[in-house]
Amino acid sequence: MDIIGRFLNNRYELLSSIGAGGMADIYKALDHTLNRYVAIKVLKKELNSDETFVLKFRQEAMAAASLSHPNVVNIYDVGQENDINYIVMELCEGVTLKEYIRKKGKLDISDTINIAIQIANGIQAAHDKNIIHRDIKPQNVIITMDGKVKVTDFGIAKAVSSQTITANTVGSVHYISPEQARGSHCDGRSDIYSLGITIYEMLTGRVPFDGDSAVAVALLHIQGEMIPPSVYEPMIPVSLEKIVMKCTQKKPEMRYDSALDLISDLRKALMTPNEDFVKIIRLDTSGETHTFSEEEAKKIKEQTSGAKVPVTTKEETDYQLGIDEEEEHSQDLDLEDEDINVDSKFERVIMAIGIGVLVIIIAIAVFLVGRTFNIFPLGISSNKTETTKAVIEETLGVNQTRMPSVVGKTLEQASDLLAEANLGRILKEEESNEYDPGYVIRADYEEGKILEKNTQVTLYISVTSNTVTIPESIIGKKEKAATNALVKLGLIAKIETKSSETAQKGTVFDCNPSVGKNVKVGSEVTVYVSTGPTKTMVKVPDIYLKTQEEAEALLKESNLVGKVTYNYDDSIVKGKVISQEPKASSKTEEGSTVSYVISLGAEEVLVEVPSVTGKTLEEAKELLKENKLSVGSVTEQYDSAKKGEVISQSVISGTQVSENTSVDLVVSKGEKPVEQETETERQTNEPTDKKPDETQAPPTVGVERVEPTTGDE
């Protein structure tokens, strides 16, 4: 189904397809709440219709989601939306171990050990939470770009294993344990077996068992003899070869009891590779060929029904989830075609029980006859005891045995006794002042107790006290100070940050195990460092195309702080918001900063103003035009410059201005001409050195002279 671009849980935006496997399609997605990329595994449509499977799938995935470890591809979320069931996982960049082996052919010793240790660390973290992988193989191991090794698909194989699906979907038959091939109960030692096969492939570039069908390969896991890896690669050190052989023992009780034990031996092999220190307990050295009951044969057929055995593999080299899309050519399984010995176990059991009952009846009859005729003297109690003991011994069923005396024995002695009694062992350490290190302190079954054969017996082995107390003084200290305090005690500090309403930011407020607890030297202590009080998450408003004033108002309403910058934009009008970060509708902490950019409009292009003085007006206009400038006002004035030449400009030459800026010009009219003086101007300009004739009567202008009259008139 095409769901690219769809949102799941209104949070995860599906961006692109990464790959596909037998049970799910994988997508790269953006988590808008935490603003990070994730990988989302979406169940295929045909699996969604099986409600029982979907429920089991969700339960197992949710259990695996509690697992957080650097060597595990972590599951963040499990969800369902309409017809989509999905798992949100950590997105890792890198290649699968299968692809890495294919490219290199085989790995060197140190690379193999380092990768195996990291895989085992991831497996142990899961086993500590009672999660069994059931599908450990190179296709489910990712090597990231920075060299970290991560195991993927925890908790998923168990859900799938209850369904009748092809082997390509459930997992490759080349890596399954014998108990998985039989369809029997599996525990953490099944993962150790599969890891042993994976180490074998890293060292040699091949798997130890191969065949024409899934049944053929499954049978080899159950009863086939493994060729030691040194046959293919003679330079493999004895310690590492024995580690592989111990991991891949047919019986779980003969393998490592835990991934921690395996890690311990791997580290020794890294330091002293040629030392023969690996102990392999042989519980069954008869060498007899294993035969299968009809029920076992039926289970093997059901486990691999319809499956195909991959002869050449090509998994997704993509970096998320180690999906293997194997190019397979093989044949469908038909158990009837296989050469399997099916014995009649039921008939043998009935015969054994009948013989046992007959022996008991005969023994009782002999005893009663002897008592009647005084054949057995009453005073000889020891004979009576021996007879009674013999009768009791004969009452053991064919599949029963007795718990031997192991307390006070060395581990080697106790292991031999358990092997003789057809019992397995689980080892646990316990401090003791009564027993020397390496001796059995106690077992979970009393001596003489009747047990079913192959029962796992827990032996508690004495160890010396090598513990320290986690100090209370680390609480309240800064991260570095607390780490140093733990390191001085021989402990490993693992830092995790968490919010705290009371602890100051950057200080230690808790640890696991808690302060005051006694732990072994070399143990890991998780130290919780405060990030301060928990902050409320708010939705980021959409401020695109808003003015700065409008944007600030919207951010203030959401209790967010704005940080503005400016930039030119040809398409957005000046003064409007071009972009924002975080994006609109995403979630962020209350009080956090939202950065946004305001448009300055189209970017201005600056040009340099040329000098046009001394040019003619036409030349000046042309020169300004060439420089993407225009002529403003033009005025004229007299000047000694040649008429028509520009004598000044409004913008000084060399100045940087915007394109199309106007430049005002002043043009010369030439020199000012000399004008002719008028008569009046000439007289006015003549000198006045000559004195007026005082005897001369002043001229009369406009005054009529009146002669004096006499009275005779």
Image: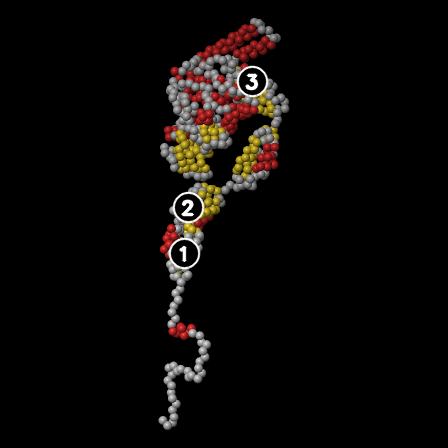
Note whether 599 is above or below 675 in the view shown: above
Say what secondary structure mark 1 lies in.
loop
Residue 92 horizontal/vertical position (percent): 46, 32
Mark 3 burial class by Cα count in 10 Å: few <14, some 14-19, many 20+: many
Say what secondary structure mark 2 lies in.
strand
Q: Disc 2 marks which amino acid?
A: Ile
Nearest to the eye among marks 2 and 3: give it. Answer: 2
Q: Disc 1 marks which amino acid?
A: Gly
Q: Residue at the location (61% across, 22% down)?
A: 437
First in sequence: mark 2 vs mark 1? 2
First in sequence: mark 1 vs mark 3? 3
Residue 145 horizontal/vertical position (percent): 47, 31
- 622 relative to 593 in the view: left or right: left
Q: Which residue carries the number 2 mark?
A: 578
Residue 506 horizontal/vertical position (percent): 55, 39
Mark 1 burial class by Cα count in 10 Å: few <14, some 14-19, many 20+: some
First in sequence: mark 2 vs mark 3? 3
User: Disc 1 and disc 3: Cα gap in Å?
Assistant: 113 Å
User: Disc 2 and disc 3: Cα gap in Å?
Assistant: 75 Å
Q: How is the image coloured?
A: secondary structure
User: Disc 2 and disc 1: Cα gap in Å?
Assistant: 48 Å
Q: Which residue carries the number 3 mark?
A: 415
Residue 454 marker: none
Q: Residue at the location (58% across, 6% down)?
A: 376
Note whether 77 is above or below 560 in the view shown: above
Nearest to the eye among marks 2 and 1: give it. Answer: 1
Note whether 424 is above or below 706 in the view shown: above
Q: Disc 3 marks which amino acid?
A: Ser
Residue 614 marker: 1
Q: Residue at the location (52% across, 38% down)?
A: 498
